[in-house]
Image (cartoon, helix red, strand yellow):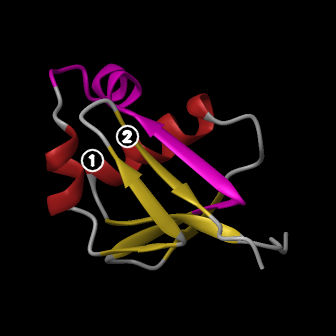
Amino acid sequence: MTLKQPVGPVVQAGEMAAAVVSAARSDNSSEVVVKDRGSYVRIELDGECLIRRESIERELGRPFRMRELEVNMPSFQGRIETTSEYFRFYATAS
């Protein structure tokens, strides 16, 4: 699938990446493209990607703070809006 405006996080491989992929799928209505690069996972959506704290908590089965994602997210694509409840990645108008 080719995305017109791919946006989303790049997360170090492991439990956190799996939780973020699941959260992206539950928090967004558009298709989620996952590119496993071995040591990291690139998660892409077209135009906007929302990742909610409560969705990651549900996946991990424990309390979660969004700053934990920052530590495991060496990069991202698009612009980012961060709060204690969600991260939103979005495309700029072209």
* Quarter of the image with the C terminus in it: bottom right
Residue 46, magenta (yes or no): yes
Name the kind of residue labelled 1 in the image: Glu
Q: Secondary structure at mark 2?
A: helix
**Residue in front for this viewpoint, 82 or 40:** 82
Could you tell whether 52 is left or right of 28 in the image? left
Q: Position of residue 1 (x, y in %)?
A: 85, 69
Residues in magenta?
A: 44-63
Name the kind of residue labelled 2 in the image: Ala
Q: Secondary structure at mark 1?
A: helix
Rendered residue at 50%/37% (across/down): 22
Q: Which residue is mark 2?
A: 19
Rendered residue at 49%/68% (across/down): 79
Q: Which residue is mark 1?
A: 15
Rendered residue at 24%/51% (across/down): 69
**Separation (CA) of disc 1 from disc 2:** 6 Å
**Residue in front for this viewpoint, 20 or 81:** 81
Q: Position of residue 55 (x, y in %)?
A: 41, 25
